[in-house]
Amino acid sequence: MSCDQAERLLQTLRTQIPGVTDDMLNLQLFNVIDEFFRRTNAWQHYDDIPLQENIQQYVIPVPSGAVIVRAMGASHNGMPITFQMSPPDLVWLFHQPDLPMIEHPVVMGVSLSVAKDCMAKSCDCWEIPEWCWNSFFQAWLDGVLARFYSMPAKPWSNSAQAVYHHKRFRNLMGGHKQEAEKGFVHSLPGWNFPRVGGWM
């Protein structure tokens, strides 16, 4: 469960934004997390879609509490395939599956964000993977602080702090987007030209 990590984030926000209500925290935290996932593609999900002969339209499995942001790709028997998305969760294959093709499922990859239905619940009940709360804690903290500090005529209003945390949020979001594009691998081995007598 992500309850401990969510509570840690909430407690940190309460100490830096005195007087804020839990409903306001929940709303702004939802907005920040939704913006973060939609811009970074950091929450990705891959699932098998069993094929049926001559059927080209399929529903993409989506985890509870999540919504699809965009498709990341699809493959069949290890090879990329062409397809078209029909929001929110339908995929159209360009080729009708025949008998040999249905022996293997399509592996569909999508990026996700938190579903709007979650706003009716406390954030510690949102079904976001725990690793996300751990990895993106600082980005989400800065994003929420930037939103609150930029509110006019509030006890916590602070234009300088709003600019500071907004810049940090944008920078962290850019870094996490690059991480997601690389599959969260810190560095990939470089290619060396083979020398005589074998590969190096």
Image (cartoon, rainbow, N blue to C red):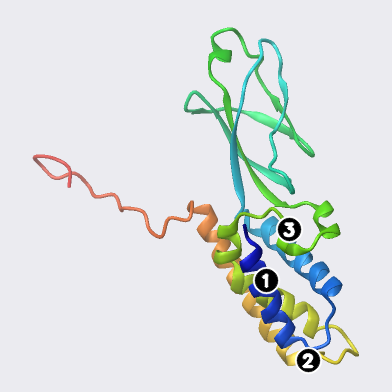
Mark 3, other Cα within 10 Å: few <14 / some 14–19 / many ≥20: some
In the image, which is nearer the foreground, mark 2 or mark 1?
A: 1
Task: Determine whether 165 is above or below 187 in the image.
Answer: below
Residue, x 71% and y 89% (percent of image)? 161
Looking at this view, name the residue that lies furthest to the right.
Answer: 153
Image-quadrant location for residue 136: bottom right
What kind of element bears circle 1?
helix
Mark 1, other Cα within 10 Å: few <14 / some 14–19 / many ≥20: few
Which mark is on residue 125?
3
Which mark is on residue 7?
1
In the image, which is nearer the foreground, mark 2 or mark 3?
A: 3
Image-quadrant location for residue 83: top right
Closer to the camera, 106 or 141? Answer: 141
Looking at this view, name the residue that lies furthest to the left.
Answer: 197
Measured in 3D between alpha carbons, the distance from the residue under mark 2 to the one under mark 1, in whole angstroms, is 24 Å
What kind of element bears circle 3?
helix
Measured in 3D between alpha carbons, the distance from the residue under mark 3 to the one under mark 1, in whole angstroms, is 11 Å
Count all numbered tags in the image, as a single digit. Answer: 3
Q: Quadrant of the N terminus?
A: bottom right
x and y percent of residue 75 in the render? 54, 29
Q: Amino acid at mark 3?
A: Cys
Q: Amino acid at mark 1?
A: Glu
Which mark is on residue 158?
2
